[in-house]
Image (spheres, rainbow, N blue to C red):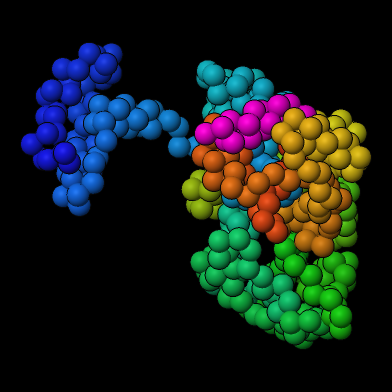
Amino acid sequence: MAPTLRDLPSVDSLLADPQFSAEPRALVVTAARSVLDRARVEIRAGRDPGDIAKLVLAQLESARRHSLRRVLNATGVLVHTNLGRAPLAEAALARVVEVGGGYSNLEYDLEAGARGSRQDHLAGLLARLTGAEAALVVNNNAAAVLLALAALAEGRQVLVSRGELIEIGDGFRIPDVLARSGARLVEVGTTNRTRAADYERAIGPETALLLRVHQSNFRVVGFAGQPQLGELAEIARRHELPLVDDLGSGAPFDVGDEPTATSSLAAGADLVCFSGDKLLGGPQAGIVVGRADLVEKLRRHPLQRALRADKLTLAALEGTLQLCLDPERARREIPVLRMFDEPAETVRARAERLAALVGGEVEETVARVGGGALPLAELPSFACAVEESLTDLLRAGEPPIVGIVRDGRLLLDCRTLADADIEVVAAAVVAARDS
């Protein structure tokens, strides 16, 4: 006989159930009301709502589960924006635990016994790594560019090549950032070709600065060209204008053909902006390095306080940057750089081990850097191919596992899985098949 609304227990009767005695009363009430509301809908539709007590327990378990969770990345995309971009190095995590577990000298000068600046903690380290006179850290690279434009060009003109008016993830567009900063965009050149002379002709009394934007997530090929940074630097110097270079990903040293802040400054850029959580392999952050007088203008701008990085970001970034002082160590210990450099045969061995554990097949694949960096780079990789039907089950597991569905199979790319992840993934695959 189908259950009726009269068969549903009351909230009070559920609260009296011994299996809920150890649960906080308020949570049980909320869960019970939610389950009963859904049960009424099911009954009115002629369906059995199921065991109400078990449904309440499931609701309580769901409420306790963290929303932000660790995920195993089996997509082959190293800097996966949807999956949190760069995983942190152990040294960076250790700094977060040390600094976040108690008080810190975030804005306190221990030598002077007086108020200090949070920007002082990484300025020297960034100067040492890049050769810059000064540095500043904000919460992401979009904020770094916005702050630079607001502090140096509000109400005035900024020259940008039409081929650099880019859009990156989630609708972030350079023209929109310029508008929000209060600066006025002046487009120079054409989509595929811009010459140094185009900048020269566009400079006028209202020009505040020249902005170069790295085409981080695409490339224009064929009949195309952009002036060298040194050419722009010469024009900027001749007209006594700052040259700001937005690098986007910001590799700490040579990684593929991605430009570095060091090379940009050496070529004549006055300010360079780049991300902390892409090829640098650190936390989400925007970093500005360059001339001390310009960095100081950014530091004193009112917007800087709204965009500044917190203590945990600074701690993780410090741990990452300290690794970068030794490039060989950084390539071993910063996960993104290690995955980028890892030999294909090592990845193949990992895929073969996983395939042997789950009865899958090894398939040759191509991994990508992601995060808007090195869009043309193809990293030879290997995946373990299993049934497509496991996709949703693995994604719903603990930890969730995200792969790539291709040609009717789920590919678990082993370039973005660590050695320690293989047994975890194998156990999840076996459990998913048995469910």
Which residue is rendered at x = 60% and y = 57% of the image?
142
Please tell me how many numbered marks the rendered image carries. Answer: 0
Q: Is residue 416 above or below residue 58?
A: below
Q: Position of residue 388 (x, y in %)?
A: 63, 50
Of 158 and 12, the residue lying toward us: 12
Q: Is residue 78 above or below residue 322?
A: below
Tell me which corner region of the image, top left, top right, bottom left or bottom right, holds residue 14. Answer: top left
Which residue is rendered at x = 61% and y = 19% of the image?
98
Instruction: Indicate whether residue 278 is drawn in magenta.
Output: no
Task: State the extent of the magenta-drawn residues as a range.
Answer: 419-435
Tell me which corner region of the image, top left, top right, bottom left or bottom right, holds residue 188. Answer: bottom right
Q: Is residue 182 above or below residue 411?
A: below
State the residue lying farthest toward the front.
Answer: 1
Q: Position of residue 289 (x, y in %)?
A: 73, 49
Tell me which corner region of the image, top left, top right, bottom left or bottom right, holds residue 223. Answer: bottom right
Q: Is residue 339 visible?
A: no
Which residue is rendered at x = 16% and y = 39% of the image?
1
Q: Position of residue 131 (x, y in %)?
A: 84, 45
Q: Position of residue 11 (x, y in %)?
A: 14, 28
Of 13 and 284, the residue lying toward us: 13
Instruction: Indicate whether residue 422 is drawn in magenta.
Output: yes
Q: Is residue 333 visible?
A: yes
Magenta region, mostly helix, strand or loop?
Answer: helix
Which residue is rendered at x = 11% and y = 40% of the image?
5
Is 32 displayed left or right of 340 in the figure? left
